[in-house]
Image (cartoon, rainbow, N blue to C red):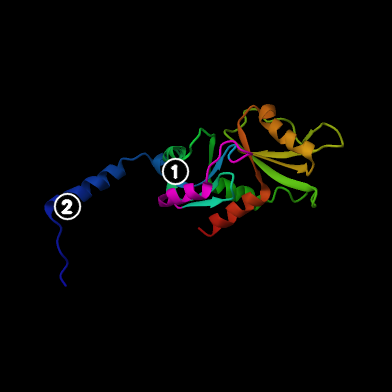
Amino acid sequence: MPRRSQSPRAAKKRSVARSNLAFLHPTFYLLLVPSVVFLRAVNVGRANRCQPALIAKQLAKFGVVNIGAVGTFVVRKDVSESTLRAAIAKKLPFKSEIMICPARDILKLAKKDPFARQPSGPDITRFVNVLARRLRAPPSLPLSLPADDEWLLKIIAIENRFVLGVYRRQMKAISYLGKIEKLLGVPATTRNWNTIQKVAQILNHA
């Protein structure tokens, strides 16, 4: 069949659209990347209750995948941080710190295997604290809490916005997790290293 020719009006609209895109600053495209979202202090005890799985369904147009119950989302579509932040905030029935990281940063972190030389076993938990922003003056590392040989929590590295550490599975160790924010002076949210690895797996198959 012969191809239908475009009307002059339709052709003009397409031409205008192309010209508008041509004038966009190159950094505009750098803002549109797959992301990973970490919500702070969600579903901890009876405070800040929400349904992350439902939020992921409501934001399906962004290709959102929910992981776990504390607010970890893989966003597979290319969407700006400002758009994503606003969309998630509208779905939350409370105010929450929303940490958004480029997917490439998570993949880079997971590929390094930063815990390779650290103690392991059933009594050790590997964790990552995601910071709201990068630290201006990181502390000297490793940093043990308490500061002696009988440490309960140890920070082993700080890379970009990620604080990497291990803690012993004891009740007292949990209290030290909450002290990391005060120590660094930046809002943060904690995830198990297994969660970060799962995020990386989803991104690699996106």
Q: Which residue is mark 1?
A: 30
Q: Which residue is mark 2?
A: 10
Residue 15 percent coordinates (x, y)? 21, 48
Mark 1 element type = helix
Three-letter code, disc 2:
Ala
Three-letter code, disc 1:
Leu
**Crowd tier of the residue under label 1, counting other residues whose Cα lies within 10 Å: few below 14, some 14–19, many 20 or above:** few
Q: Residue furthest left?
A: 8
Q: Residue at x 62, y 35 (%)?
A: 188
Q: Is residue 166 left or right of residue 29?
A: right
Q: Tell me the tag on residue 157.
A: none
The answer to whether any part of residue 153 appears in the image is: no
Q: Residue at x 14, y 61 (%)?
A: 5
Query: Closer to the camera, 13 or 88?
Result: 88
Whole-angstrom CA distance, mark 2 to mark 1, is 30 Å
Mark 2 element type = helix
Residue 99 percent coordinates (x, y)? 54, 38
Query: Closer to the camera, 108 or 59?
Result: 59
Which range is magenta? 43-63
- Which of the 4 image quarters holds residue 134? top right
Query: Closer to the camera, 139 or 60?
Result: 60
- Count numbered badges in the picture: 2
**Crowd tier of the residue under label 2, counting other residues whose Cα lies within 10 Å: few below 14, some 14–19, many 20 or above:** few
